[in-house]
């Protein structure tokens, strides 16, 4: 019974967060940053536009390229979405509101996050299309490259909190200060790496439409494309949530003790607000800067971010032991 | 400094984010048109003398005119009726018209005017052929002539106020 409820919660939260993100950021924030209004007709301020868009995707034909590897091509979006679903499970929205409070929470998040790379490569290979393949190769190179600074940035927090469990990392921050202050470099690198993991501008070389049509998404249409899109936006949500958990104190509110039932009511609201703020920063960058060249993109990861996080890691470790 | 461009870009988009949007919600709100907007050409039939200048000058041949001779009112009381040219047909095919305005420009008797109306799209392309009744109806939307500039002289023998719609 318990597991059914948890599955249902997941089945609601993932599409909902993706929908909220599409509406708030892709429709409205982006539009206003370009002095437009975005969709306004369907519902108040275009809030029902997503229903129209969803129905449009569902009506479309489920296309398979003639020479595609049907099995791999068909299941690629499912693998990508599964990775997103698995990441949601361990993020604590309040002291008790967490689906699975793993002891190795953050390790688990990093592990399942890299699953999506496999889905992307499956899509690239299965499409039997040169643009898809090149996009997939770029995506693989990029996701692997940025996984490293992402993990290293997280490690600083782990050392400071002394735990891999996301709940305990939040507790550690509630006990002292939010880790954004001592781990400012880690936070910045985490945001940059998250941007790259989401393959958003300025790191959207895998789907650079001027060069690769749409990269590994080229051959997808209808429901399968919708799954990819859902996964991308839900991953943006969950990565923002993880950033909040690691660096911004999770559901913790400074100067206010949250206890008992009140904590479980207010904490998710605080947590969502913080998540939306971090997501706003991520999307703000996405809407502001042009994409990098492939070599610049790789150089940033290997020559700047990784040394930076390594130094950060060493300093954190030394200070942790010394102080 | 490295990253200065990034900060500048972010500042610009954030400032734009809080600015008022320039979008006009078209069917609900309409933009004010410029004073000499070229929306549609209106015909003031009683001024037309079927001289065909407009039809001949039209670069895309979208004006169709047929006329006949008729008796007009005499010049003086009790005088001999004058000859007058009347219109049988005056059609403008807006599926061909390129809105150059040469016809309006060339008309020696102020029978053609620009109107700012632009909402006359049709599902059937043939319906874009506006006949003289329709072109006459557009006269109601023709704006007043803008006032003459300071120091400009009114031409002798012409009453400017009555020639406009």
Image (cartoon, rainbow, N blue to C red):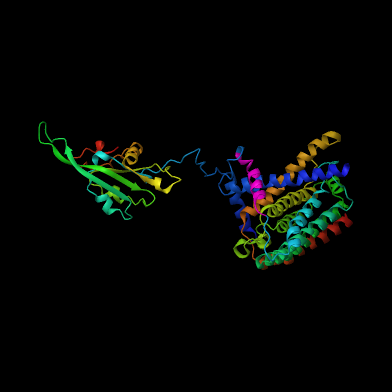
Q: Quadrant of residue A316?
A: bottom right
The spot of residue A203 in percent (x, y) is: 67, 60
The spot of residue A180 in percent (x, y) is: 77, 50
Query: Does the segment drawn in magenta span residue A48?
Result: yes
Numbered-mark total: 0
The image quadrant where one finds the C terminus of chain B is: top left
* Of A187 and A42, the residue lying toward us: A42
For the question of whether residue A250 can be seen, the reply is: no
* Of A320 and B29, the residue lying toward us: B29
Is A55 displayed left or right of A168 in the figure? left
* Of B80 and A277, the residue lying toward us: B80
Task: Single out the residue that lies furthest toward the top.
Answer: B77
Q: Which residues are magenta?
A: A45-61
The image quadrant where one finds the N terminus of chain B is: bottom right
The spot of residue A238 in percent (x, y) is: 76, 50
For the question of whether residue A5 can be seen, the reply is: yes
* Of B153 and B69, the residue lying toward us: B69
The spot of residue A53 in percent (x, y) is: 64, 47
Is A108 displayed left or right of A272 in the figure? right
Q: Main secondary structure of the magenta part?
A: helix
Q: Quadrant of residue B61?
A: bottom left
Q: Residue at x 33, y 55 (%)?
A: B60
Is A230 displayed left or right of B43 in the figure? right
Query: Does the segment drawn in magenta span residue B15?
Result: no
């Amino acid at each position: 019974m318990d597991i059914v409820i948890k599955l249902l919660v997941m089945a609601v939260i993932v599409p909902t967060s993706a929908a909220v993100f599409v509406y708030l950021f892709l429709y409205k924030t982006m539009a206003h940053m370009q002095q437009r209004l975005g969709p306004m007709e369907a519902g108040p301020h275009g809030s029902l536009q997503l229903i129209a868009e969803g129905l449009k995707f569902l009506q479309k034909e489920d296309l398979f390229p003639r020479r595609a590897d049907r099995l791999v091509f068909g299941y690629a979006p499912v693998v990508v979405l599964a990775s997103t679903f698995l990441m949601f499970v361990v993020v604590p929205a309040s002291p008790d509101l967490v689906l699975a409070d793993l002891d190795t929470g953050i390790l688990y998040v990093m592990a399942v996050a890299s699953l999506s790379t496999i889905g992307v490569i499956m899509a690239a290979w299965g499409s039997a299309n040169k643009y898809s393949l090149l996009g997939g190769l770029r995506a693989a190179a990029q996701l692997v490259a940025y996984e490293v600074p992402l993990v290293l940035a997280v490690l600083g927090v782990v050392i400071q909190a002394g735990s891999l469990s996301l709940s305990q990392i939040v507790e550690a921050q509630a006990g002292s200060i939010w880790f954004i202050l001592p781990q400012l470099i880690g936070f910045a690198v985490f945001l940059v790496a998250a941007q790259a993991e989401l393959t958003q501008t300025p790191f959207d070389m895998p789907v650079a439409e001027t060069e690769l049509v749409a990269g590994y998404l080229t051959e997808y249409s209808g429901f399968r494309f919708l799954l990819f899109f859902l996964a991308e936006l839900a991953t943006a949500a969950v990565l923002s949530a993880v950033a909040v958990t690691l660096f911004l104190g999770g559901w913790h509110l400074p100067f206010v003790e949250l206890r008992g039932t009140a904590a479980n009511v207010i904490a998710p609201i605080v947590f969502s607000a913080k998540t939306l703020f971090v997501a706003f920063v991520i999307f703000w960058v996405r809407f502001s800067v042009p994409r990098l060249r492939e070599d610049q993109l790789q150089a940033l990861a290997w020559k700047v971010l990784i040394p930076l996080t390594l130094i950060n890691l060493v300093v954190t470790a030394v200070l942790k032991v010394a102080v | 400094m490295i990253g200065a461009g990034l900060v500048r870009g972010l500042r610009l988009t954030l400032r734009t984010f809080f600015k008022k949007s320039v979008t006009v919600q078209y069917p609900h709100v309409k933009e004010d048109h410029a004073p000499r907007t070229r929306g549609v050409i209106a015909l003031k039939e009683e001024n037309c003398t079927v001289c065909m200048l407009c039809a001949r000058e039209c670069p895309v041949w979208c004006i169709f005119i047929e006329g006949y001779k008729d008796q007009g009112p005499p010049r003086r009381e009790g005088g001999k009726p004058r000859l007058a040219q009347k219109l049988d047909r005056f059609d403008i095919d807006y599926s061909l018209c390129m809105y150059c305005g040469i016809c309006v420009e060339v008309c020696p008797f102020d029978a053609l005017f620009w109107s700012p109306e632009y909402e006359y799209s049709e599902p059937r392309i043939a319906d874009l052929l506006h006949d003289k009744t329709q072109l006459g109806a557009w006269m109601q939307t023709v704006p007043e002539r803008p006032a003459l500039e300071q120091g400009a002289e009114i031409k002798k023998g012409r009453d400017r106020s009555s020639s406009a719609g």
